[in-house]
Structure formats: C-alpha cells, structure tokens
Image (cartoon, helix red, strand yellow):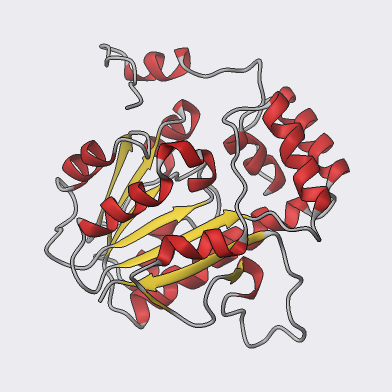
Amino acid sequence: MTENPAATEDPAAALRSRIDTLRPHTARIWNYWLGGGDYYEVDRIAGDRIRELHPAIGEYARADRLFLGRAVRHLVAEAGIRQFLDIGTGLPTADNTHEVAQRLAPDARIVYVDNDPLVLAHARALLTSSPEGRTDHLDEDLRNVDSILERAADTLDFTRPVALMLLGVVIFIGDDEDPYGMVRRLMDALPSGSHLVLSHTITSPALSEVDEAVRFWNEHGIPALTQRTPEAVARFFDGLELLEPGVVSCSRWRPEPAEPVEPQEVALYGGVGRKR
C-alpha cells in the first residue's frame, strides 16, 4: 500500500510539501507536451530530450486526450453511462472527463483519483461539476484498490454501471505488483453494464526509439514506466466484451468520420470493454 502524509490544518501546504521540483515528473511532462503551463524547467528539459529521442511523442499525449473524449462520448450517448471513476487523472487540461460527460449528461458523476500533489492542487480548483452533477477528487494510489472503492462510494452508486477510466496509469505498475489483479479487482466491484477504458504505452520490435525514450525516462524521471506488448495490454480486458475495433492505437479507436485519412499510429494502445 502507498501511504500519503497525514492531513494538516492547511491541505494546500501539505500538498506543496510533497511536490518534487528537482526531478521530472510524468504528469507535468505530459502537460508540457499538451501545450499546458503546469510544469517546471526540469520537466521541460526532460520532455525536450525525450522528444529528441522520439519526435512523435507529443502525438501520444494528443492521441490519448482525443481517445478519452471519443470513449466518454460513446459511453454517455450510446451506453447510457452516468458515472465515471477516473484513476490517474493527470493535470487538468481541455476536455477532462467530467467536461465531456456533463456536456451530454449534466447529471453525470465523476470521481477523480490521483496521488500527484500538483494534480490534486489543480483538481480542487479546476475540476468542478455542473450544478446537476457532481465531481470528487481522491488523494489515492491505484495500488490502494480497497480504499479507492470505499471512498468513491460516497459519490458513486456501485449498484449502477460505472466507467472505470485507466488512461496511461497502469504503465506505472510493475509486473511484480500484479497489475492485472488490480484492474480485475476494480472491475469485480462494479456491476454488469460497467465499462473499462484503458490506454497503455506499448513496446514492439518496430519501435526501438520508443524503448530508448522509456529507458531515458526510467533513468531520470519519476515514476518508472513498464512497457507491455499489444497482446499484454489486451489481457487487461480478459473476461470483458471488447468493443470494436478492439485494442488498437489510440489514434485509431473510432476516429472521427470527417478525418480524410487514417490517423497515424502511435505506440499508445487503448480499448473499451463492457462487463456482461
């Protein structure tokens, strides 16, 4: 279990004390690649170095954000989902989960979960709900499955379908920590009709530059990443009804019909699965 410092009378000060400005952090670099401003110089330097090793890396961040939007719109409009458990939220940017969902269903409820203090500080200010719906923000680690479920139940009704959002977060769980078991335990707690939305960086013999960029990151940044093959990513959906087109490059999961050509493939794969 990952422990977070005890709360103090000044929550903002407690969060600030946990921010490491001396080492690059993935959430801040992701924000930098998306064109945001919530990063430090150490993150910009690392982000630029990774982009030198793999120039297309910025497209991954954009592809993941667009994948989130398309998946949430499908879940709300086509599957009738009104509840979202978004673990590994990342720094707020355009079209966050609650914004996409509540545009279509103002009564949608979203629980955001992250253990990055900078993310949490911004979440409290920016991830605010429509009057009809509700958002909440939990300071938790994905590894703390039982605590996440217990605390999320204050906002979400686990007798009704929930969309579990795990975008770019399971990559931080090593193979020795039972990542498949964590995802399965979360899905086991959700009723029939719930969905899993997951994205994950892949490794492939054809993507040596991606492997090199990940090696650089694991030497210099936090937290460490674990790459997996497309087949290993697909295993997270075992036992679920995998929606078409399956586990594919995030850029190619149901792209907008107006796009004139097939989107460029990125080494970030994603899919959506339904619990029967």
Residue 265 vs 125, above or below: the answer is below
Nearer-the-camera pick, 192 or 122: 192
Residue 209 vs 263, above or below: the answer is above
Residue at coordinates 80% horizontally, 41% vertically from top-left? 212
- The answer to whether residue 245 is left or right of residue 258 is left
Nearer-the-camera pick, 247 or 257: 247
Estimate the x, y position of residue 226 in percent, counting from the top left: 59, 42
Q: Quadrant of residue 78?
A: bottom left
Q: Quadrant of residue 73?
A: bottom left
Estimate the x, y position of residue 145 in percent, counting from the top left: 28, 41
- The answer to whether residue 161 is left or right of residue 90 is left
Residue at coordinates 60% horizontally, 27% vertically from top-left? 222
Q: Quadrant of the N terminus?
A: top left
Estimate the x, y position of residue 245 in percent, counting from the top left: 54, 81
Estimate the x, y position of residue 9 in percent, counting from the top left: 25, 11
The residue lying furthest to the front in this view is 176
Report whether residue 169 is seen: no
Residue at coordinates 46% horizontally, 16% vertically from top-left? 18
Nearer-the-camera pick, 67 or 37: 67
The residue lying furthest to the right in this view is 52
